[in-house]
Image (cartoon, rainbow, N blue to C red):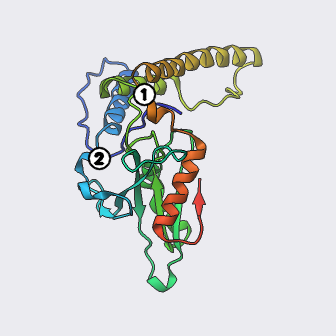
Amino acid sequence: MTFDKSPRLPTHVPAPQHSKSRPVWACAALALLGYHLYNHIRLDVLLPNSAVASGITWWPCPDITTTQCAYLSVPRDYAHPEANDTVSIFMRKIPATVASKDYLGSILINPGGPGGSGNSLALSYGHRMSAVVDGRYDIIGFDPRGVNMTTPRLGCYENEAQAIHASYKQTLLGVPYDSRGSASFPAGTRARMEHAYLTRLNASFTATSLACLENGNRPMLESVSTAYVVQDIERIVDALGEDGLNYWG
């Protein structure tokens, strides 16, 4: 699992003034930095406290009020559940647009990764997904435990600046990367480029892992797994009151 993913909120980053003599890559670097600053804005501080509950109470999202946000409380450790030891799963819903007689339920979406934010996926593509199913389903994106808006956070970095810097470095590496390389280069050149890239990428991910070991929330790190995310999904479906799971991811 990668380090904590960050909230995606619409914000305006004023365009910096550049002289014509500055290279184009400087503009791109500033744009990427603005993108990562944008991604680390906290949405949870804007939500009402009552949104964190054992059931699902939907609220208009503070950033995009045509979408709905909620938290669902689930056990941190399903093997040894305790009432005061929970994880709050953050969700964003794109409501169905049809009349109730044509409504078919909910579809949960998740981009995978691992470590991708379903909340961000819903924000970016939820309306397109809704159009594919003719608006007959609620499209619900959730942040898996350890990701983005879901709490407690993994806490691998001492502050937001360190997290932004680490994320930015991965962007500079070109994540995600096409392992086949470019067909325009000879095979030997591609192999050398890919090896050099993977060496840098491994160093970046190793640094993230070490940061988690040094600073991270150990109980949460021990509770981040595919098996537990599956059980979280089951809890979401139960809380929605639906008979089965519709999943798109």
Give the residue number, with chain letter if any, for mark 2. 43
As rendered, which of 2 and 73 lies closer to the eye? 73
Question: Outermost residue, right direction?
Answer: 187
Q: Residue 56: horizontal and vertical position, in percent?
A: 38, 63
Kindly identify the residue that appears in the image at 53 percent across and 22 percent down.
Answer: 205
Whether residue 111 can be seen here: no
Marks 2 and 1 sit apart, C-alpha to C-alpha, by 19 Å
Q: Residue 41, image x and y in percent?
A: 29, 39
Residue 73's tag is none
Pointer 1 residue: 167
Image height of 7 relative to 110, above or below: above
The part of the image, by quadrant, that contains residue 50 is bottom left
Task: Choose the circle earlier in sequence order: 2 or 1.
Answer: 2
Report whether residue 234 is seen: yes
Per the image, label 2 sits on a secondary structure element best described as loop
Label 2 neighbour load within 10 Å: few <14, some 14-19, many 20+ = some
Q: Is 60 left, or right, of 103 in this rendering?
A: left
Image vertical order of residue 196 relative to residue 160, above or below: above
